[in-house]
Amino acid sequence: MKTGDGRNTANRQCGSRQFAGLENPPKQFMAGGDAISAVVPVLEQRLIELHAYEELSKSTNGSF
């Protein structure tokens, strides 16, 4: 069956069952290639920033 936007509901239902059956489901799930394409660069940039200031962050251990 197709939705109003032309997508196949059977594929989504199959994916939903696969997701529901996971032993350790992800805390965040990006559905679709376009979502992955949008989110991955943002997360990669955040990791670069995190690593750039990692030593400064660690230097605050026990300083409060």
Image (spheres, helix red, strand yellow):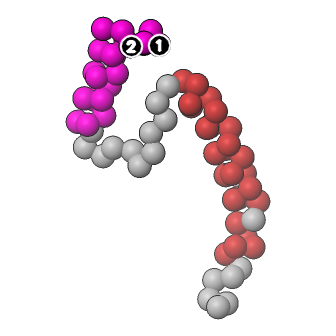
For this rendering, which residue is in front, 32 or 56? Answer: 32
Residue pictured at 61% horizontal, 38% vertical: 39
| Residue 48 x, y percent position in the rendering | 72, 51
Q: Quadrant of the N terminus?
A: top left
Kindly check if marks 2 and 1 are in contact, taking CB atoms under 8 A apart as contact. yes
Q: Which residue is mark 1?
A: 5
Residue 13: percent from left, percent from top: 28, 22
Q: Which residues are magenta?
A: 1-21
> Where is residue 27 drawn, in percent x and y?
41, 49
Q: In the picture shown, does residue 43 fall above or below 12?
A: below
Quadrant (top left, top right, bottom left, bottom right) of the C terminus: bottom right
Give the amino acid at mark 1: Asp
Q: Relative to the observer, which residue lies in front, 27 or 52?
A: 27
Residue 48 horizontal side relative to residue 2, left or right:
right
- Give the CA distance from mark 2 to mark 1: 5 Å
Secondary structure of residue under mark 2: loop
